[in-house]
Image: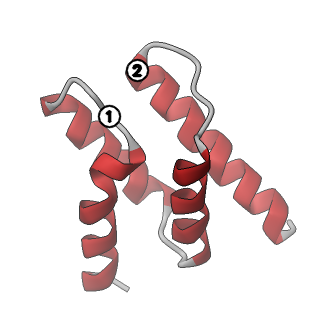
Amino acid sequence: MSAATELRAYVEALESHLGRLRGREVVLSPPEFTLARGWHGAGIDLARVLAALDSHAATHPSVSLSAVRRSVEAKAEREP
């Protein structure tokens, strides 16, 4: 699978998950896409991002990639 195909799958999974959490179809904004592309490029596991989104959604009415950025990146720094 090419890097572009892998990135597309990563982004589509994030859009789908965010759509379920928000109750509507989601397309990442340019800043959200840049964040997702950076996480993908850094090798941050998709499951880690999805878990952070779920955790945030459990206690906050609004969920976004920027809302979980700190937790995702902090955990990535602690765990290889």
Residue 77, quarter of picture = bottom left
Q: Is residue 11 placed above or below 38 in the rendered structure? A: above
Q: Which residue bears the numbered disc 1?
A: 63
Position in image of residue 39 (x %, y %) = 51, 68
Disc ID at residue 22: 2
> Is 60 on the left or on the right of 13, as rendered?
left
Position in image of residue 61 (x %, y %) = 21, 23
Q: Is residue 33 placed above or below 38 in the rendered structure? A: above
The residue at the point 64 percent across, 53 percent down is 10
Position in image of residue 73 (x %, y %) = 33, 71
> Is 66 on the left or on the right of 15, as rendered?
left
Q: Is residue 17 placed above or below 78 in the rendered structure? A: above
Q: Which element type, helix, strand or loop, lies under badge 1?
A: loop
| Most foreground residue, 14 or 30 | 30
Q: Are marks 1 and 2 in contact (CB under 8 Å)?
A: yes
Question: What's under tag 2, amino acid-wise?
Answer: Arg
